Amino acid sequence: MSGTKANAPRLCNATLAALPADIAHPAYDRSTVTAGIVHLGIGAFHRAHQAVYVDDVLADDPSWGIVAASLRSADTRDALSPQGGLYTLSVRSGAGEALRVIGSVMDVLVASEAREPLLEAMANPRVRIVSLTITEKGYCHDPATGALNESHPDIRDDLQTPDAPKTAPGLIVEALARRRAAGAPPFTVLTCDNLPANGAVVKRILDRFAALRDADLGAYVAGELACPSTMVDRITPATTDADLVSIAARLGVRDAWPVVTEPFSQWVIEDRFPAGRPPLENVGAELVADVAPYEEMKLRLLNGAHSSLAYLGYLAGYVFVDEAMAGPAFDRFAATLMEEVTPTLNVPAGTDLAAYKRSLLERFRNPALKHRTWQICMDGSQKLPQRLLGPIRDRLAQGAPIDCLALGVAGWMRYVTGIDEKGEPIDVRDPLAELLRDIADRAGPSAERLAPALIAVEEIFGADLAADPRFQEAVTQALAGLYETGAKRAVAEVASPRN
Ligand code: CS2
């Protein structure tokens, strides 16, 4: 067990050759890799998803290495720099665990500490893609409309001092301005966040930000920048200390920040890269003309069910998703919610939707993936519109009932009050947490007061849902049920019996 000690040798290029034979590691020569991608937002998801596809590409083409950045936190840089960017991917299911060391990350920067080196990397003409996993709130947009939030304090700062940006839109537009001044073509911006029409949304934000900087730059970005849409999918919980210990024991060396994920992985990409792209179709990604149907299907079925399970599961006392799924009521609820959502979808041609939904339920049940409901509950104000409110709008337009979706929204409302069913505090993480808590405190524990007060938050619900009595009634009733009977009973009541 010496490999698990804090002073054990560290995972790095020099220790790769000594790894046990069952642990895959880069077969290509890392010293020949050059940077072709700058990635903003190096969290667990990027390391379990895009960086793995790129690791596979590098075996054939070493010009697509990744220089990754965190916008603020130094944690990932501090963990990965001494390892030369190497880290372990742990793929877990009921069948066991497979480990693989990933080598595609060449360098990690922290934007707030190394702004110039990051902008230089983005301005380097060999970099042809700037990709993003900055989470929904990183776009500094209005979640209900998708437009740039021009009164966001960080956006205002970045417009004041455009050559010293701190937001993702500010960094991207400054790098584009520098490339333009140097006569280099723009990179392609590849967003990998769970937003509907994510390419169009980021394009609109960047066009607007550039236009606010100056009209000429605005016209250039509007005319020249390509932002293809993507659908990304791999469930990736936060790494725990226990993961560090068990993975080090298998590696025989210490990895300060491995990443734990599931076997399933999907990446559907709109094939529009004027500056070139890696041959991702050779490594399992799907390059298509229109991502929208894939995105909608995934956001509404997977993420919509995930968020609903998370809020209601948390309230019912479940720490992990698989634990909630082990109780029959939540499993049936997730399936019933997916049935409610199905008539709102434009399914991609050739999809076996029933099999897709079955596989989602199976993935939620994965007993080896300890995914905290609390983690998924984060940033609900940014997630609700695309996950639950979009399908609700479509169902209402069809004159169809919204029992499960309304219960999901009510679960979020009950959760953001900050007090759980046992009267214990909830650590609500959300950019609007304070506003939401304030509304909840003023309304008190009354569904009739709380539901309409929260629905009035226009940046989440828009003006249309606030004005729709059917929505208000369904959510108020669901919230009243949560207060009266608690989440477990409320979930059991809307879930269809097993057939
Ligand atoms: C989750 C997603 O945390 C969340 O909000 O719903 O991160 C989910 O695990 C991924 O989108 C799966 O691809």
Image (cartoon, rainbow, N blue to C red):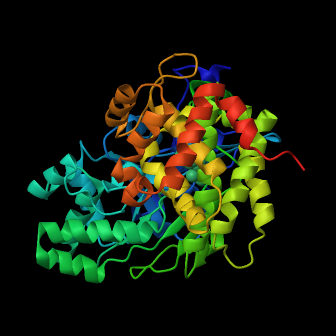
Position above or below: 391 against 15: below
Camera sees residue 310: yes
Judged left or right of residue 325, residue 461 is: left
In terms of depth relative to the viewer, which is nearer, 294 or 147?
147
Q: Quadrant of residue 67?
A: bottom left
Q: Residue furthest right?
A: 499
Q: Nearer the viewer, residue 59 or 98?
A: 98
324 lies above or below 69: above
State the image quarter where residue 491 is shown. top right
Q: Position of residue 433 (x, y in %)?
A: 37, 35
Rendered residue at 65%/48% (across/down): 404
* Position of residue 374 measured from the top left corner of the image (x, y, whole percent): 54, 32
Instruction: Report the number of numbered marks.
Output: 0
* Residue 157 spot, x, y in % from top left: 14, 50
Q: Nearer the viewer, residue 438 or 99?
A: 438
**Quadrant that contains the N terminus:** top right
| Residue nearest the viewer, comparing 81 with 322 | 322
Q: Position of residue 37 (x, y in %)?
A: 41, 64
Residue furthest top as drawn: 423
In the rendered image of this protein, does residue 366 appear above or below residue 102? Answer: above
